[in-house]
Amino acid sequence: MRGYTQEKLAEKLGIDAHYISDVECGLRNITFKTLSKLTTALEIEPFKLFVFD
């Protein structure tokens, strides 16, 4: 999404890049707070993360 690397996205969200990697790999669950930061950073509505067309 939007061409961000994990490192750049983590920097934009103010979190560790390893956290993003762990979420992507299914090793950790994302918090609502971080989900909110993510959708704001990506400038998308939260439901768009759950639409798989």
Image (spheres, helix red, strand yellow):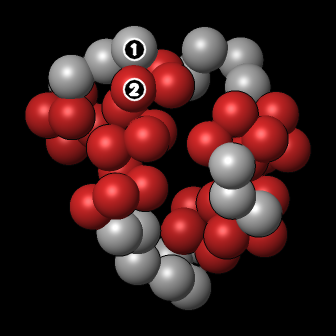
Q: Quadrant of residue 22?
A: bottom right
Whole-Å distance between the Cαs marked 2 and 1?
Answer: 5 Å
- Is label 2 in a helix, a strand or a loop? helix
Task: Say which residue appears at 79% left-offset and 59% top-offset.
Answer: 17
Looking at numbered disc 2 in the image, what kind of residue is underneath it? Thr
Q: Is residue 43 left or right of residue 1?
A: left
- Residue under pointer 1: 43
The quadrant where residue 18 appears:
bottom right
Provide the secondary structure element on which disc 1 rests. Answer: loop
User: Where residue 45 sits: x, y (%)?
Assistant: 21, 23
Q: Is residue 25 above or below residue 14?
A: below
**Dot 2 crowding, Cα within 10 Å, few <14, some 14–19, many 20+:** few
Count of all numbered marks drawn on residues in the image: 2
- What percent of the width, then of the height, locates residue 25? 60, 71
Taking the image as drawn, is residue 52 in sight?
no
Q: Is residue 53 visible?
A: yes
Q: Are marks 2 and 1 in contact (CB under 8 Å)?
A: yes
- Is residue 20 placed above or below 25 in the rendered structure? above
34 on left or right of 5: left
Residue 46, x across and y down, in percent:
21, 34
Quadrant of the rendering where the N terminus is positioned? top right
From the viewer's side, name the closer residue of 32 and 20. 32
Q: Which residue is mark 2?
A: 40
